[in-house]
Amino acid sequence: MPYRVALGGFLHETNTFAPSRAGMEAFEQGGGWPVLTRGEGVFEAVRNVNVGASGFIEEGRRRGWTLLPSLWCAASPSAHVTREAFERIAGDLVERIRAALPVDAVYLDLHGAMVAEHVDDGEGEVLRRVRLAIGPDVPLVASLDLHGNVTPLMVESADALIAYRTYPHVDMAETGRRSAEYLADIIGTARRHAKAFRQIPYLIPIAWQATAMEPCRTIYGRLAALESEAVPTLSFLPGFPAADFPDCGPSVVAYGASQAEADRAADEIAALVMASEEAFRGRVYTPDEGVREAMRIAETATRPVVISDTQDNPGAGGDSDTMGMVHALVRNQARRAAVGLIVDPAAASAAHAAGTGATIRVALGAKSRVPGDAPLEAEFAVEALSDGNFVAPGPFYGGARMKLGPCACLRIGDVRIAVASRKAQMADQAMYRQVGIEPTAQAILVNKSSVHFRADFEPVAETILVCAAPGPMPVDPAALPWTRLRPGMRMSPLGPVFAGA
């Protein structure tokens, strides 16, 4: 008989310092990802989408397993998941897995950095509850985002945690496939691998975690080389440095045929990460510095200069509505410049009411009231309108169907602004094109993203600059008002040490 494998997904990356929390509506809307889906509908919801469950399902079907989906959901990064949303989703997931028993294994598609209003360790709690439901002997494997803040409870509850190896995350579905391949090695047997878990004592800014750049390129290269029959899976997670709880930070998780093998692999990667601390720092511009440098480069460039508006990255909890970079573009009279996305439902609605070709006066953006930020109150030309429904075919979203609500292209001077009603990280050129902006025809592009945009924009960019305009996700995590980190953690590479609140 084919193996019976239950599966589910519950993903959220939590910035505990962000302005907005994630309730049920956030998971029901998806924020650029498939919406909350239960039962057999999961198969269609994640089909051909770059998420872990998609790859796992493909590989599981290839192996002839009977797959039993519970539910799958994700929401845009934000502040805490509400108690109500966490309990309803986690409770439903566990009950559906329990109803599927007996099963031969369970796979979970998780993020690894979820914090709920009442639970610091969201994934640890989900894994703990699933483990209680299925018992100690059923294999339980989870895929994780490499931004996961791994905890001892997560390691204890799962038989394996397997993380992405690319940032931008172009290998999410591939990680699901790797999880299925690992599970295939232990399903139907009593064999389990020894575990080794190491936590790194400094926070790594997400802007410098790109895996095609050093030092991550070398670290992940060595990690892949260490995998073998003796060490079947090994993960380095740079972590998500905006979750104020003791287990926030980078980690290494290794699984070995023996404890000595697992320890040896974990220790080698941990030592390499420790030796790379200084390399996890880079050049950051102020908004005016970045715009002026981009304008200077654009004078002779043949491709767009791309600026990362990293501190309002909706992929790190921002609301994608701060206006610091827009003010800088207008103030410096930038030419052939575009910004995306500014999330302002009221402005989008006003544009739709006025129609293409109209001029409207609105106070654009800054609804999240980030300190130091202010709306841009001005007259804007309405150049294009969209219903916000489109496919994002680039390597990060991987064909995800976007539902951003009413959208518009607003122009002030020679600056074009892609305005949306719902937030999603600017990581696909289609997010500009759906409001009539051709990104490759611009001299300057300002993207509200830290790294994921690189997957689709780096091939068309003259160069990439990182700017720090006001926003809820400081490029330097030491700037955050930490109160609950582990004492002794350095709050940035070679930075100040957290000594307690």
Image (cartoon, rainbow, N blue to C red):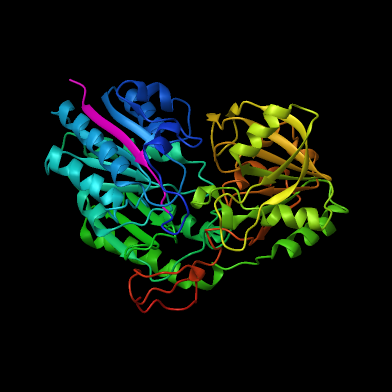
Q: Residue furthest right?
A: 300
Quarter placement of the C terminus? bottom left
* Residue 198 in view (yes/no): yes
Q: Is 449 positioned to the left or the right of 248 in the image? A: right
Q: Is 106 positioned to the left or the right of 110 in the image? A: left
Q: Quadrant of residue 258?
A: bottom left
Indicate the position of residue 212 as horizontal and vertical percent values.
Answer: 57, 53
Q: Residue at x 47, y 43 (%)?
A: 76
Q: Is 441 positioned to the left or the right of 347 in the image? A: right
In the foreground, 339 or 490: 339
Q: Residue at x 43, y 74 (%)?
A: 490
Magenta highlight range: 1-14
Indicate the position of residue 388 as horizontal and vertical percent values.
Answer: 60, 29
Q: Is 229 positioned to the left or the right of 139 in the image? A: right
Indicate the position of residue 356 as horizontal and vertical percent values.
Answer: 76, 27
Q: Residue furthest front?
A: 361
Q: Residue at x 17, y 30 (%)?
A: 103
